[in-house]
Image (spheres, rainbow, N blue to C red):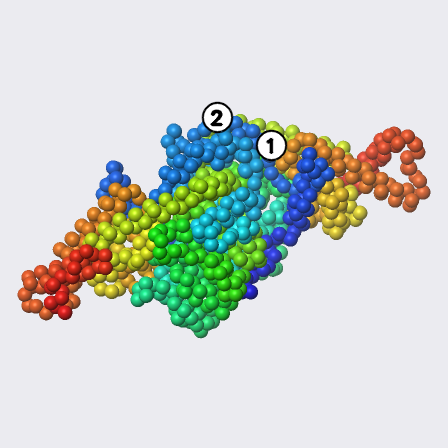
Amino acid sequence: MANVNMSSGRKALLSKLATNDGHAENSPYFDGWKAYERNPFDASRNPDGVIQMGLAENQLCFDLIQEWLINNPQASICTAEGVDMFKDTAIFQDYHGLPEFRNAVAKFMGQVRRGVGKFNPDRIVMSGGATGAHELISFCLADRGDAILVPTPYYPGFDRDLCWRTGAQLLPVVCDSSNGFKVTREALEAAYIEAKEANIRVRALLITNPSNPLGTVLDRKTLRDIVSFINEKNIHLICDEIYSATVFGSQPSFISISEIIEEDQEICNHDLIHIIYSLSKDLGFPGFRVGIVYSYNDKVVECARKMSSFGLVSSQTQHLISSLLSDDEFVEKFLSESAKRLENRHQTFTDGLAQVGIRCLQSNAGLFVWMDLSHLLREKSFLAETDLWRIIINEVKLNVSPGSSFHCSEPGWFRVCIANMDEPTVEIALKRIRAFVVKGENAVVAPAKKKQCWQSQNTKLRLSFSFRKMDDLMMMSPHSPIPQSPLVQART
Amino acid sequence: MGMLSRKATCNSHGQDSSYFLGWQEYEKNPYHETLNPTGIIQMGLAENQLSFDLPESWIAENPDAAGFKRNGESIFRELALFQDYHGLPAFKNALVSFMSEIRGNKVNFDPSNIVLMAGATSANETLMFCLAEAGDAILIPTPYYPGFDRDLKWRTGAEIVPIQCTSSNGFRITSAALEEAYSAAQKRNLRVKAVLVTNPSNPLGTTMIKDELNLLVTFVIAKGIHLVSDEIYSGTVFSSPSFTSIVEVLAGRPDCQGSDVWDRVHVVYSLSKDLGLPGFRVGAIYSSNRAVVDAATKMSSFGLVSSQTQYFLSAMLSDKKFTSRYISENQRRLKTRHDSLVHGLKEAGIRCLESNAGLFCWVDMSHLLREKTFKAEIDLWKKIVYEVRLNISPGSSCHCTEPGWFRVCFANMTEETLELAMQRIKEFVASASSAILRGGCERRRGRRHPSSTDKSLGKKFLTKWVFRLSSSHLREADDR
C-alpha cells in the first residue's frame, strides 16, 4: 500500500487526543525503558547490558504456577482435558464475566486480606488490566476538567490512565520524606483548597495502597483520616490495591479500605468507595490483562459494567484464572511462599545497598524499593537528579526510575525494582552499584563537594578530606554496621 | 452520594434500545430443547456457532499451543509477562495473513500497520478517539448495528449522522444520500470527520458492490474526510458476489495512486464473527496512517488482547491447512443455514433481502404490520418476542428508515432449533392472517371465505390464502 507522509494540515483531520502528548510517553519514566531496550542485559549474551530495574514485575513465583498448570490441564480450554469447555468459553462475551471467574476473584481478594472483609462477586467488574480499570473509573466519576487528587510520589501511568481520554486532571497532594511520605490531613486539605481557589471541581482522591513507588502500606490512622476527609468533602475514594498480595513480613500488615469501612460502618458513605485491582503484580500475570473495578456504589457498578465492554478479559483467561484461584490450597501456599521470596529479595537488596551507605525508605511491600540517593546529588535539584539518573543508566547500566517521574517533591529518590530478575542478576546489580559508589569517591562527586565546604588552602589535603567526608556520608546509614568515623565526630 | 460523571448518568450507552430489551426478555425465559422447550429462541445474537468442531480438532492435534509450550518448552512465564502493546509479532503476522486469505490474497496487509484491541467494540471506539471528538460527526448508512451508538459516541463525544438508505434499491448507498447526510451534519453545526461502513453489512448481510465502494472513495476524496470500513464479517461471505475490500478498490483506482486518501482509510477487524470467538476479545485496527497507528497503539493499553489468547491464536492461524479448511467449510455451512432460514420464511410468506454474507437475514415483515409505522413495528416485535417466542431485532433499533424490517440470526443455534423457530413463525403468520381474514370477512361479507368443513383441508386452504394474502401485500411493498 502506498504510504504518503502527512502534512500538518492533514494532521488536523485527527482528533486532539491522537496528536497531543496526553499519553505521557515522553516522560523520563519511559526514557529508561528505551535505553534498556537498546541494550538489554543478558547473563550470557550481553553481560554488560542495561539491567532492567524500572519494571515492576513479579517474577519470583512462576515455578509454582507452572507446576500447578502441569497438574491441572483442564484449566486451559485448549488441552485434551479442557477442550470440552472450548465452545462455551469461546462464545462467552457477557460483560458480567464468567460467574466462576467473579467468584474466584472475590474469594482471592478476601484471602489476600486474610479473611478480613468479604467481597461480593456481583460487584466485580472486569477491565483491560489496572490501566483499563483506572480509565474506566475516571470516566464514571469525573467530567472533563474535573480533578482527582493524588498523593505524591505516584505511578507515572496515572497521568495517562486517568486523564488522557477522559479529560480529567490530577492534582498532587504533596508528601515528603519528613514523615516517610505519609499522607497527612493537612496535605489533603491544602490540595483541596488550592483546587477550590482555582475553581476546579474535585471529584475524587486516588490512593495506592500498598504504595507505588514507596512500597509502604498505609496505617490505620492514615486510612481513617483519608476516609473521613473524603466523606466530609463528599468526594470519591479510589483505592488502588494492586500490590495487596506483595506485602511481606508480619508488620505492618496490609489494611484494605474494605476493612476500614467494614469495621466502622458509620465512618463514611459507602457509595464513595471504589477499589481497583489486578492480577498483574500479585500473581505476575500482566500479559493476561486481568483488571478489576470493585465498587461499593451500585450505580457505578452498573455504569462500569457497561463500559467494561471496551476492555473485557478474554474468556479463555477468565477460565484459567477461575480454575487457578478456586484451588484454595494452592492459593494459600502461593501467597505465603510469594511473601517469603519477596521478603528475602528485599532483604538481600537493601542489605547490599546499606553496605555502600545507600538508604531506602523502610518498606515491606511492593516489587521495588524507594532508594535515597540525595547524598550523591551535586546539588539538591531535579536537574542534578536527572544528571545522576543518566549516569546510572549509561555508566552503571541500571534502568532505575527517577523520583521526578513520580512527581516526587524532593530530588534524589529513585524507585528500583527488584522482583523482576533472578538472584545472580541482583548480585550483579549490587556489584555495579558498589563499584559506582566507590568510583564516585574517586572522581565524579568529589569536585562538587570540594566547592561546598572546605576552607583549607592545601588542595591535596582538601581532596583527601573530601574522600574521607564522602566515605563517612556513605557509611552514615541506619543499616550500616560501621560506626561513624571519628573524623566526623571530631569536626562536629 | 458523590455525583457521578455525565457519561455515567446519561443513557447514550444505548442500552435502553429495544435491541437490548429483547436480550433481556430472552434471558428471563431462554429456550432449551429439553429444559425449556417453550422458551424464547435467541435469534437476536449474531454469533457463529456452526464450526467449533474445527478449532476443537485442531487443538486435539496440537497439544503444544494448548499447554503454553513451544517445541515442548514451557513459555508460560514469557506469555504471562508479555504486555507489550505492539502485540505478539507471531500473532500479528498470523492475523494479517488470515485477513489476506479471506480476501482471496488479492490484498497484502503489513503487520506493522495493525493495532490489536480487545474486540471490535474496543477497536471502533479507539479509532473514533483518534479521528473525532465532541463537535464532530461520523456518517453511517442505515440500517446499522445498534452497538455503534454506544461504541462510537458514548465516551468519545462524537455524533452519528445517518446516511439514509431505503429498500427501493436494496438499501445501497447513493450519492444523493451521502450528500444529504453531509448537509444534515453541517446544518447541525457538526464537522464531518468520517464515513463508517460495515462491509459485509450488519444487519443487511450483503457485501458492498464495487459501484458503492467507488462512490464512497470518490466522496471521501472530495470531502477530504476519513473512511472507516468495518470488515468483521468479511470471512462470512458464502456466495457471490465475492467480498471486495475497500483496500482493493483503492489499489485499483488511478486517482488514488500516491494520494493522501490512503492516510484516511482504515479497516476494523475482529475474530468474533469470522472465527466465532467473541469471548476471546480479539479486535484490530488496520491503517497505513502512521499517526493513527501510533496513537491507537498507545490507546490500546486500555484494552490489550490477553497474551494467552494471542499465543493460542498465533499458533492456530499460522496453520495454513487449518485456515483454508476453516474458511471454506465455515462458509459452506453458513450458506446451508442461510438457505434454510430463507426457505423456511418463504414458506410462511415472508421475504428476505437477498444476501450473501453475515450471520443473519434482513427480513421483510412489513406486510404483517397493521399500519406502516414504527409503533406498529414495535407492537409486532413484542408479539414475536412474547407470543411467538423468538428474539429477533426490530429494524428501528438499527435506525432503519422504513418500518417492518427485522434482523433474524441463523448461525447461533442447532438446525433443529432453527426448524422449530420456522415452525413457530409459520403458525404465527397463519393465525395472524386468519385473524386478518376473519376481520376481512366481516367487512367484505364472506367473499373469499373458505367453504370446506374438513378441518385439515380447511387448514391447507387457509395456508394457501395466507400465502396469497401475504404475497399481495408484498407486491404492494415492491411498488413503493
Q: Which residue is found at the position 85% from the left and 43% from the top?
A: B436
Q: Is residue B404 above or below residue B6?
A: above
Give amino acid for label 2.
Answer: Glu
Q: Quadrant of the N terminus of chain A?
A: top left
Instruction: Measuring from the top left, give residue A191's x and y in whole percent.
Output: 41, 69
Q: Quadrant of the C terminus of chain A?
A: bottom left
Give amino acid for label 1.
Answer: Leu
Q: Is residue A142 visible?
A: no
Label 1 element class: loop
Q: Which residue is found at the position 72% from the left and 41% from the top?
A: B389
Q: Is residue A74 above or below residue B149?
A: above
Instruction: Measuring from the top left, give residue A239's x and y in whole percent.
Output: 45, 58
Q: Counting other residues with Cα less than 10 Å from the Cα at mark 2, is it few (<14), some (14-19), or many (20 or more)?
A: few
User: Would residue A384 appear left or right of B159 to someone viewing this image?
Assistant: left
Residue where numbered disc 1 is placed? B50
Residue where numbered disc 2 is placed? B61
Instruction: Measuring from the top left, give residue B55's x and y in whole percent.
Output: 52, 30
Q: Closer to the camera, A3 or B304?
A: B304
Alpha carbon distance from label 1 to label 2: 20 Å
Q: Which residue is found at the position 73% from the left and 38% from the top?
A: B38
